[in-house]
Image (cartoon, helix red, strand yellow):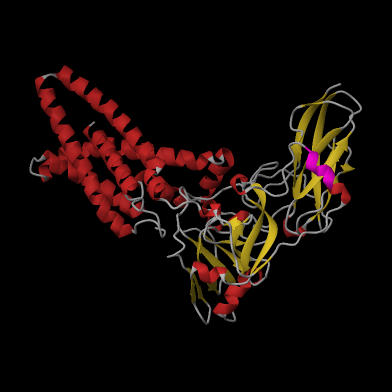
Amino acid sequence: MAGLVGSAAVTGATAVAHTVAPAVRFLPYALAQSLIRAAPGGLATYFIEHLGHWAMRLAVAGTAAAFVGSGAVLGLLISPLRRVGRGRITVAGVMAFLPMWALSVALYPAPDSTSLGRWPFALVTLPIYALGGLVAGWAFMRQRSVRRASSRQATDLSRRYFIRALWWGALSVLVGAASLGRLLYRRPDPGLQLLRLRDVEPASTPSPSPSDEEFDGVAGLEPQVTPNDLFYVVDEEIIDPDIDPVTWRLTVDGLVGRPLSLTYDQLKAFPAVERYQTLQCISNNVGGHLISTAKWAGVPLPLVLDRADVHTGAVEVVFHAAGGYSDSLSIDQAMDRSTLVAIGMNDHVLPRAHGFPARILSVGTYGMKNPKWLSGIEVVDRPYEGYWEQRGWSKAAIVKTESRIDTPRGTTVHGPSVSIAGIAFAGNRGVSKVEVSTDGGRSWDPAHLRTPLSAYTWRQWLYRWAPRTRGQAGILVRAYDGRGSVQTSRYVRPHPDGASGYDATTVDVGG
């Protein structure tokens, strides 16, 4: 019980330290980040597929509970350590908490530009754990003295300590998780600012066809461009890095003749381009919503690599992100002008959640190949395994052809004509045709396609259905890429290389 009181004190102290100085990571969060990164590929994939976003939340909650509850184990060390501490219970309490401090330092995740390094972290947290040990020793002596007087009073005191430790531990976790210090001291989201570039090639869009106007009135259909605040967000960082653009540097090294260290202003001074592009997460399920489209602004990566003078023999280009994430592209992909160092999104500065100050944006690949919070570019002479590839996921991560029904979804439809609509995407291969079935897949009819915003975006599709009978109807959709290949009907889970299968819904046809 004394150890539990001590661990609650440690949790509260680290929450206060994190609030006053956000660079001091909240210990349960720091340990949860380490556990997430250390999880074997099969385990990580299992929880992501079955729990989605809740996988990370439950990992954090479980780590926080274990962190507070660890005191119950540490407290068992106090009695045997009294002999080492010459009978001084407070000394024994401090010694009992030192193993947890050492474990916290050993498991401390790789720091980013906004957090303390491992050894400064160790120095800052040592007094916190010592405080927890002193509190545990005090609670031990208090209960011991009361137990000598009355066993009933000792039981009541233990019950009170237990309840208070749980309440204090839970409150401390809430304070630490709220990151109040980051709210007080954090810079405003840069994504609120309009992006201003001296040299930028505006995005060009194909001329719309007269029939494109009929898409505008379809309720429930995903818009062609996703607003920044609705754009999907998936990453393995528990808290988005808050990077200062004044001190940020983008390093370019490895097999290059002229290593670079670019400031944010120097990166923005490169000639930039704008383009519309759809981005999809490899964890997106069939019919899922981890897919969005934006107008991006960025510097073609070959311009940066050419300035660094890439050596002959380069095989891949590795992208390092603040916090430790990394992935790579082949040298051919990296030297293609379609690959961007993105710095803007929908006419605004790149939002923090999407990688400010810069992220990679490649075409035809899932989002895992486009690291956010870019901090370094390294040219290497060998194949490289990125964060998710080390866990068994696809290295190429090429987007599969997919289609989705946005409307109607599992409802009752009425009237002589029903609008069935959605989106289809096939990466940089484009979408050439979409077909809809209203009889469970026995027959298929072509849908009308809207002119895409670019060769790299999804296409909206629309089918006007005239039901002939009442009752239930099974609606399915399938798409063909720009090469004429139809998407597969075989259902496959998202991992390791993306989901496949037909999206479907069942509707009731009324009068």
Instruction: Identify which residue, 212 or 322, lies in the foreground.
Output: 212
Which residue shows up at 31% across the image and 39% down it? 70
Secondary structure that dominates the magenta span: helix
The single residue placed furthest to the top in the displayed view is: 152
Residue 310 appears in the rendering: no
Determine if the magenta segment contains residue 58: no
Instruction: Identify which residue, 341 or 44, lies in the foreground.
Output: 341
- Name the side, left or right, on which 149 lies relative to 272: left
- Name the side, left or right, on which 402 lies relative to 45: right
Stretch in magenta: 213-218
- Name the side, left or right, on which 65 lies relative to 282: left
Where residue 391 appears, as percent x and y from the top left, is 53, 54
Q: Pick the quarter of the image with the C terminus.
A: top right
Where residue 31 appears, as percent x and y from the top left, is 38, 47
Q: Is residue 61 above or below residue 237?
A: above
Instruction: Identify which residue, 261 or 430, lies in the foreground.
Output: 261
